[in-house]
Amino acid sequence: MVNFKIVIPARFASTRLPGKPLLDIAGKPMVVRVAEQAAKSGASEVWVATDHQGVADAVKAHGFNVMMTSSEHASGTDRLAEVAQHLNWQDDEIVVNVQGDEPLIPPNLIQEVAQHLHDHSQASISTASHAVHDWPTLFNPNVVKVVTDRMGYALYFSRAPIPFARDSFGGGPFPEDIPAFRHIGIYAYRASFLKVYNQLQPAGIEEFEALEQLRALWHGYKISVATTEHTPGAGVDTQEDLQRVRQIFESHSV
């Protein structure tokens, strides 16, 4: 199995759910639940990167590695880059970004994304997708779609329906053979890319689509896309999400 590391960015501030990383899920903070799932993936190291001492203390208390990172970071990717630089990870190390609000993330999905980057030597980043099977999903701007080339490298990500099925959108059944894929927001990076990421100027397409990964494509970096069946449950963005996840954990006595 490919060797890889995991970093879980855990920013304390959250508009909709203040103190999100420390919210309780069946007796443990959410960030710890995420770290437990991450540890099942076979990663050689799992780190939590945070800007809050209380989060750091909770992570340490449950036996996981933690690093205090700058509160000025604009994204989780910036937080990963600080960890990679501080720990002096070699350029060819594979680092998976597991979001700190996804306590239901399948460990197999983390493995798949890391393996996909390893297997696609031209890529600096890998991510995941799964097939779309209905019109509402394809046309939902909150659902990010991705199209790839024949080798599995991303051509474009968009909130628009891509590819646009010109002859089918006037009505009728969903075309079963359309190569439409929903993007799953998990990323693996080569450490060499993380070291230059913050030097890349934001791209216009990134700002209009509000999709950070388009910056890498615009600057010529390749992103490999694994097609998977290991789709994660929804992350925790609202109080309703939190209640749903709590019920899942409690029903399984986790």
Image (spheres, helix red, strand yellow):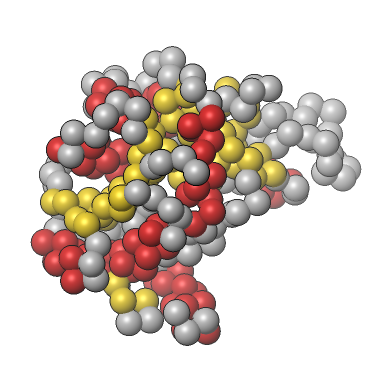
Q: Position of residue 42 (x, y in %)?
A: 43, 53
The single residue placed furthest to the front in the displayed view is: 1
User: In this view of the protein, can residue 219 be seen by the observer?
Assistant: yes
Say left or right for 77 vs 227. left
Q: Is residue 245 above or below residue 143?
A: below
Front residue (pair 68, 93): 93
Residue under the point 55% across and 41% down = 128
Q: Residue furthest right?
A: 172
- Above/below status of 158 relative to 102: above
Q: Is residue 95 above or below residue 62?
A: above
**x, y percentage for residue 211?**
43, 35
Q: Nearer the viewer, residue 202 or 103?
A: 103
Please report the residue visible at 40 percent of the width from the left and 57 percent of the height from the top: 38
Q: Position of residue 107 (x, y in %)?
A: 49, 57
Q: Nearer the viewer, residue 230 or 211?
A: 230
Would residue 191 be found to the left or right of residue 181 on screen?
Answer: left
User: Where, by quadrant of the figure, is residue 25 drawn?
Assistant: bottom left
Residue 153, given in percent of the width and then of the height, sits at 57, 25
